[in-house]
Image (cartoon, rainbow, N blue to C red):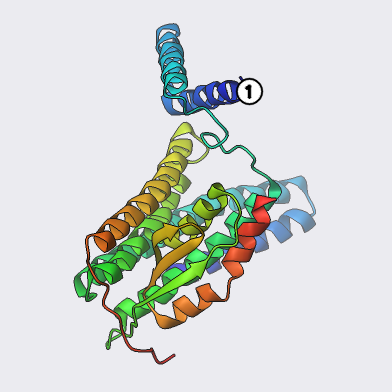
Amino acid sequence: MYAATSLAILVVMGLALIRAILGPTAFDRLLSVNMFGTKTVLLIAVITALCLAAGCFLGITGGFGIYRLPDFFTRLHASSVTDSACAFLILFALMLQSGFTLATVKLCFIFFFLVLSSTTATHALAKTARSRGLEPLLGREDKR
Amino acid sequence: MKHTFYLTMTLIAFWLLLSGHYTPFVLCCGFFSILITVYIALRMDVVDEEAQPIHLTANTLLYWLWLTKEVILANIAVCRRIWSPHLDISPTVICVDASQKTPLGIMLYANSITVTPGTVCINVEGNKLEVHALTWSGAQDLLSGEMDRRVSQLEV
């Protein structure tokens, strides 16, 4: 649904651009540039919604994984889905909303430190669990 | 001396970006807090090359782009496994050789493995990495050694 909406908006933007290039009078050009601007704002809103929805889905996937997977070491992988892609999509959506402001810079910092610290935490947790004698469950070869 | 200068500059840029308030009083506070931070860092003797890896090159940027692509693909793969009705996983522990020569390179390689969903680096001993993979095929991809090669290229 969102993808179709953004595609439609992109088509409208393209048509407006064509009119702006062809447009016999200056008024035609101004009209189409105005339309282009409006559609850009709409497109940003749709992309924001798209990113938030995808981020939420990934977050739910991570939560479901941490509930469903059989042992500690496999659950680590579920949490790393939440840490990487889910965090990025949601922060990216917020960046689109805040535009070229200091808030965007801060969101970038948040993402940077989130990735850095969650990676370190995952490794530290796994290493400690292993050295404390927690044996990973080993599985069969999977069917591709 | 050079590293102290870099650290101070980084902290100033960081402070200015985070603060967003530029009145004289707040600027003074920022100035003194940076001064104290640099002093403490010097006392702790942690101001060296490792503290501020600023050898950012076009190569590093390319590597990040490639890593982003890998992370996206791995995310999709792990999500598919989690939602699959039969929980199609095959947890595997493998040992990977890191061909990097510096500790920083090995750190980068191990972190790249951990940040990719589906593989987690459990232990590092010398240049042997112990890696836990969610699936057998994920472990095979890692053993093909493409990531190792790309990280080694960054070291030069």
Callout count = 1
- Residue B142 location, x and y as percent? 51, 72
Q: Residue furthest left?
A: A67
Is A59 situated above or below A95? below
- Residue A137 location, x and y as percent? 26, 77
Identify the subunit bearing mark 1.
Answer: B
Depth check, front residue: B3 or A132: A132
Residue at left offset 61%, top offset 37%:
B54
- Residue B150 location, x and y as percent? 63, 62
Depth check, front residue: B78 or A40: B78
Determine if residue A119 is in view: yes
Residue at left offset 51%, top offset 60%:
B127
Determine if residue A56 is in view: no
Depth check, front residue: B85 or A27: B85
The secondary structure type at the circle numbered 1 is helix
Residue at left offset 44%, top offset 90%:
A144
User: For mark 1, what is the residue?
Assistant: B2
Depth check, front residue: A9 or B72: B72
Which image quadrant: the N terminus of chain A?
Answer: bottom left
Q: Residue furthest front?
A: B126
Left or right placement of residue A31 versus residue B114 in this view? right
Type of residue at label 1?
A: Lys
Residue at left offset 30%, top offset 60%:
A126
- Residue B16 location, x and y as percent? 49, 23
Left or right placement of residue B108 versus residue A141 in this view? right
Neighbour tally class for label 1: few under 14, some 14-19, many 20 plus, Cα within 10 Å:
few
